[in-house]
Amino acid sequence: MALRILLVFTFLCVVLAPKEAWSQNISAPKYSNEFLNLGVGARALGMGGVQSAIVRDATAGFWNPAGLVGLPKRHNVSYMHSELFAGIIKNDFGSYATKLDSSSALAFSVIRVGVDDIADTRRLVNEYGAIQYDSIQFFSVADYAFLASYARMSNKIPGLALGVNAKVIYRNVGDFANAWGFGIDAGAQLRHGAWQFGVMAKDITTTFTAWRLNADELGDTYHEEETAFNTNSIEVTLPRMILGAGRSFRFADRFTALVATDLDVTFDGKRNSLLSSGLVSIDPKIGVEVGFANVVHVRGGINNIQQFQDFEGKKSWKVQPNFGLGVATHGLMLDLALSRIADNSEMSSVIVSVAYSFD
C-alpha cells in the first residue's frame, strides 16, 4: 500500500507539473540554473550523486528534503568545498538541520558556485593607444541558492516521509548583470525493511529567474555590434524528476554495504543520456558504499553515461567514475571524494566535506 502511494505521488508530480513542461512552444533553455545540478557533499558525489532514496543528513535539503527526518541526532551541520576544472570554479555548500520533534525536521542551506578574479581588460588601451595596466579591474561570476526545507513523517503510512524545499536563487555577473529567482521542490522517501525508495521532484512550479542587465556597462558593446539590447529577460527552469532505490546489507558482523541507483528524468527534449526521446530523457546513476563498524566507509559510483563521436565518426559510450572515503567518530564526519569530470582531464575534481551531529 505504501509503495502504491509513493508511485501515485510520483505520477502526480509529473502530470500536475506546469503544462509548459510538456509544451513544444515554451521558450526555455535546455540547461537552466545548472549549478544546482552539480551536487553537494563528498559522500554523495563519491557515489555518483545517488542520494534521493538514501540521504539522511543535512545535505538532504539539497538531495531530497524528506530525508531530513532521518537525522542521526537532533542537530546536524555540514560544509563542503570542491573545485572544478583545476580550481577555476569553486563550489561551496553549507547547511544546518534540526529535528523539530520525533516526526519532523527543518533545514537551511546555502550554495555558492563561482569564478573569482576575472580580469576586465576593456580599458587596457587608452584613447592614445597606450597600455595602462592599472586600468584592469577584476570581477566575479557567482551563482547562489538559499534553501529552506521541511520534512515530516506520515501519520498513516509507516516508513513514509514527505518533504518540501523553497529556494531563492541569486546570480551575479560582476557589475554587468544579476538575476533573482524562486522555486519549489518536493520529495518523498519510503523505507521498508532493508529497502529504501525515493522521489525528488525539482522545480515543480517551474522556476522563473528574472535577469537584469546593466545598460551602462554593456550598452557600448551592444551598440557596436548593432544588436538589440534588452535589459530584462526571464530564464525558465523546467521540472525534472529523480527516482531512486537502494538496499542495505550487513555481513561479517561489523561490515555493511549499501547499493543504490537514481534515475534522473528530464522533460525538456532529447539529451545526450543513456535513454532519450523527443520529450523525455533518462540519465541513470549507480552508487555503492561499504562500511566497517560505522566508522570507515569506502564509496564508488558512476554517472553521466554519454555517447561520444570521434573525428572518424566512430561512436562510443563513456561514463564518469567517482570514488570516495569517509571517517566518522563521536558525531564528527570527514568525507573525501574524487570525480573525473571530463574524459580528457588530467586532474580529478576534489571534494571535501565535514559534518557534525550533536543533541
Image: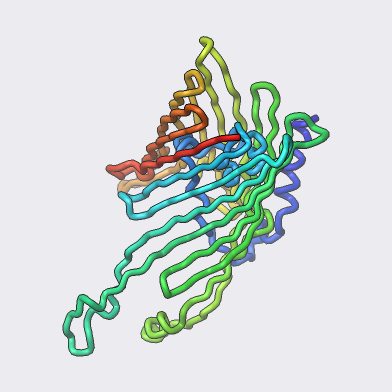
Q: Nearer the viewer, residue 126 or 104?
A: 104
Q: Residue at x 22, y 77 (%)?
A: 134
User: Which quadrant of the structure image shows residue 237?
Assistant: bottom right
Q: Is residue 46 visible?
A: yes
In this view, 189 is above or below 142:
above
Q: Position of residue 215 (x, y in %)?
A: 46, 82
Residue 357 vs residue 159: left or right?
left
Q: Position of residue 16 (x, y in %)?
A: 75, 53
Specify the farthest residue to the left: 130
User: Which quadrant of the structure image shows residue 53?
Assistant: top right
Residue 145 vs residue 100: left or right?
left
Specify the farthest residue to the front: 359
Q: Position of residue 82 (x, y in %)?
A: 40, 46
Q: Is residue 317 visible?
A: no
- Quarter of the image where the C terminus is located: top right
In this view, 144 is above or below 320:
below
Q: Residue at x 56, y 30 (%)?
A: 260
In this view, 311 is above or below 178:
above
Q: Nearer the viewer, residue 349 or 22?
A: 349
Q: Nearer the viewer, residue 105 or 197?
A: 105
